[in-house]
Every structure is written in C-alpha cells, then in structure tokens.
Amino acid sequence: MTEEPPAPDRKPVLYVVVCAAGIAPGVGKLITAAQEANWDVGVVATPQGLGFIDARAIETQTGYPIRSAWRSPGDPRPLPPADAIAVAPATFNTLNKWAAGISDTLALGILCEAHGMGIPTAALPYLNAAQAAHPAYRQSLDRLRSMGILIGSHEPHRPKSGGATDHFHWEEALELLEPLVRTVR
C-alpha cells in the first residue's frame, strides 16, 4: 500500500472488501464500474464472505486471486498495493470490529492498517434495521467517520426481509472515493 502516485504504466488499484451478506454476489457490478473507470481491482473477502461470492468468476473478472487469509512469510503478495479501498457490502459485524480496531481476519487487518497508511476508504453498509438500532452501530459509524472513512447512504432493511438487493447502489463507493483519489488517477 503506497501513498505515491502510480507509475505511468500502472492503473490505480482499488481493493474491494466483500463481507457475508445476501447481496454479496452482486459485487461484480462494483468491479465492472471500477474497471470502466480505469481502476485495477483486487478483491479481499472476509472468511464468511468468501462463501457468498462466485470466486472463480471474480478471479476471472479481476485477473487476481481473491484474498481471504493471511499469506505465509516469504510468499509473494498476490495483489498490488491499494490506492483506495471500498468495503461493499459492509456488514454490522465488520463495521463494528473495524471501528474497535479488531484485526482477526485479513480483511479487517487490511482495513485497520489502511487508516494508518492514509489510504482512502469507503464503506457501503448493508444490514437490517434491528442491527442498526444497536448502539454499537451508531458509535462505530461515528468512529469510522472520525477516522476519515466515507460511509454510504444505503438505508437498513427490515429484519428477515433480506433487503432490496436491486436497490443497492454499488457505484456509490466510487462516487465517494473519487474526490479523494483524483491525485492517483
């Protein structure tokens, strides 16, 4: 992860962190939009999120393996350094752990380090209204915002409804990040 502008022959790199939510299979929409906006995209999935996506299709689309576990010391880095990060969908669990500084998965480790490295990051929450009513959620959003994390506008859905997957605005992550990443593009 670097703060230097990319080399002229390298596209800026967007990491898309995917969490375990019913809409996660739609992440290809964000990947496509990012690629059309001239991003190179790598995907990092939470361990549970990995089970919600078509790994083979995403790896074909991005040209990179999906990361979901730490690599062994000495193993090559499978993704280029990130210039920006989009967490979509961002679940109740991931948002609260991230805000608390818990780094018990590769995805959370990357997110926790990104703050200290100044990497622009946006999160598109996807959770139900009962989860959103928990006081930890608002406190977590407040903390993440105070860290400079850009938070999307998707409204929580009714519990047990699964939410309106066709109304999730994947591209909002790029819209949020655009003003912060113009210098690397």
Image: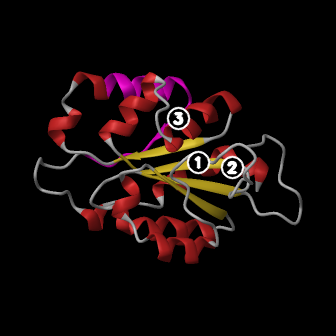
Q: What residue type is labelled 3?
A: Ile
Q: What residue type is labelled 1?
A: Ile
Residue extending farthest to the right is 8
Image-quadrant location for residue 100: top left
Q: Earlier in the sequence, mark 3 or mark 2?
A: 2
Residue that numbered label 3 is attached to: 149
Image-quadrant location for residue 66: bottom right
Residue 37 left/right relative to 141: right
- Would you call the spot at circle 1 few (<14 residues within 10 Å), some (14-19), or many (20 or more)? many
**Contact, CB < 8 Å: mark 3 with mark 2?**
no
Tell me what residue is drawn at x 62 percent, y 63 percent.
41
Q: Residue 82 carries which label?
A: 2
Residue 67 left/right relative to 183: left
Tell me what residue is drawn at x 60 percent, y 71 percent.
62
* 142 in the magenta segment: yes
Residue 174 left/right relative to 135: right
In the structure shown, which secondary structural element does the residue marked by tag 2 occupy? Answer: loop
Residue that numbered label 1 is attached to: 85
Q: What residue type is labelled 2?
A: Ala
> Distance from label 2 to label 1 (Cα)?
7 Å
**Contact, CB < 8 Å: mark 2 with mark 1?**
yes
- Would you call the spot at circle 2 few (<14 residues within 10 Å), some (14-19), or many (20 or more)? many
> Distance from label 3 to label 2 (Cα)?
15 Å
The part of the chain drawn in magenta is 138-155
> Distance from label 1 to label 3 (Cα)?
10 Å
Closer to the observer: label 3 or label 2? 2
- Which of the pair 29/185 is nearer the observer? 29
Image coordinates for residue 58, horizontal then vertical, percent: 51, 71
Q: Earlier in the sequence, mark 1 or mark 3?
A: 1
Q: Can residue 16 be seen in this view?
A: yes
Q: Residue 43 carries which label?
A: none
Image coordinates for residue 97, horizontal then vertical, percent: 40, 30
